[in-house]
Amino acid sequence: MHIELTDQAIDVAAVLHRVQADGAGAVNSFIGTVRNKSTGRPVVRLEYEAYDSMAVHQLRRVAEQAQQQWPMLQKVAVVHRKGTLQIGDVAVVVAVSTPHRAESFAACQYIIDTLKQVVPIWKKEFYEDGSVWVAAHP
């Protein structure tokens, strides 16, 4: 299992490499990027803040919960960025490997959906005319 919170650009290929396994017939990933619009407003940039030690702890718990729910998970990697991100930057990568695709899709979706709900990482969107803190799930 690889869990990381970083202020550096995320190397997606390196994250995918971490979940390669000989017994895995499926590698699934979610790559979250900064988009240029949110709720109809043009976004200039994002800033992510985190309670680092708790965020890493919670990311690990989410990954462990996924492994309990899908015991066939071979490897899991979750890397989340913090700091200032520009349009197109990678904010988060979740990657999993399993013997078959159905469990791979399900586990990957569970991890990204759950981390957005429980991990203490906060997102602030900046627009040309102001900024707003964004709730993970309104």
Image (tube, rainbow, N blue to C red):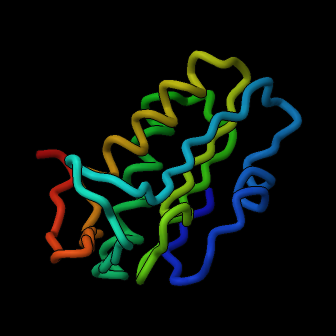
Counting every numbered tag in the picture gives: 0
Image quarter for residue 11? bottom right
The quarter of the rendered structure image containing the N terminus is bottom right
| Location of residue 56 in the rendering, given as x and y in whole percent from the top left corner | 41, 71
Residue at the spot 51% in from the left edge and 28% down from the top edge: 70
Where residue 28 appears, as percent x and y from the top left, is 65, 34
Q: Residue at x 38, y 73 (%)?
A: 45
| Image position of 21 (left or right of 63) | right
User: At which x and y percent is residue 131?
Assistant: 17, 75
| Residue 7 place in picture, x, y as percent | 51, 83
Q: Residue furthest right?
A: 22
Residue that protrudes farthest toward the left in the picture: 138
Left or right of 40: which side holds 84?
right
> Front-most of 35 and 57?
35
Q: Is residue 25 left or right of residue 129?
A: right
Quadrant of residue 82 within the rendered picture: bottom left
State whether residue 127 is above or below residue 12.
below
Residue at the image point whose x is 55% and y is 61% from the top: 88
Identify the residue at horizontal 56%, vertical 21% (top origin). Answer: 103
105 w.r.t. 88: above or below = above
58, 132: nearer the viewer: 132
